[in-house]
Image (cartoon, rainbow, N blue to C red):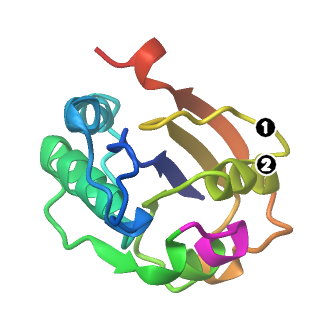
Amino acid sequence: MKTLLILRHAKSGEKHSGMPDHDRPLNDRGERDAPHVGALLRDENLIPDAIISSTAVRAIRTAQEVARAAGFAAQIKTRHDLYLARPASYLEALQELDDGVSRAMVVGHNPGLEDLVVVLTGRHERLPTAALVQIELPLDSWADLSLQTTGRLVNVWRPKEDLP
């Protein structure tokens, strides 16, 4: 059994003329919410063994703040192909994980993350910024993860509803 944690990046600043979308930083609310997600992971005993993030500034910063607050000590892996990715890209990234990883977290963007939840659970969940989803996957090997894998949605945490 594997556990997948899906995290949408925390709230980012508004688009500014001349600033590429990829480079947008977190805003004040995002900087507050990300550590709360990390504390939630720690309190729920859900600290991941691996974190894979989009290379977008807001996603990396979210992953870093969550990792710090959770006590995650390993290196965060970044992948450019997760920037505004479709579910298949997230699955490809996860398929490369070592099977010693029992709990993995991906940090990315909508609509791809909401679509990933649908693909893996058959349920549509609204994922505002800094929302976290926990899915149990009936797998022994990440390499076996596919678009046909059916997981069990365990929990969804949304910042305005579930974070301090």
Horizontal relation, residue 100 to residue 13: left or right: right
For label 1, the SS is loop
Real-space CA distance between mark 1 and mark 2, rounded to the nearest whole angstrom? 5 Å
Q: Crowding at label 1, few (<14), some or many (≥20) Cα neighbours within 10 Å?
A: few
The residue depicted at 45 percent of the width and 63 percent of the height is 102
Q: Name the residue under label 2.
A: 118
Q: Nearer the viewer, residue 17 or 141?
A: 17
Question: Could you say where residue 66 lies in the image, as x and y percent from the top left?
Answer: 24, 46
Q: Which amino acid does label 2 sit on?
A: Val
Query: In this rendering, does residue 11 appear at all?
Result: yes
Say the numbered circle drawn on residue 124: 1
Horizontal relation, residue 160 to residue 28: left or right: right
Question: Could you say where residue 161 lies in the image, as x and y percent from the top left?
Answer: 47, 13
Query: In this rendering, does residue 151 appear at all?
Result: no
On screen, 83 above or below 163? below
Q: Considering the image in quadrants, where does the C terminus appear?
A: top left
- Dividing the picture into quarters, in which one does residue 84 lie? bottom right
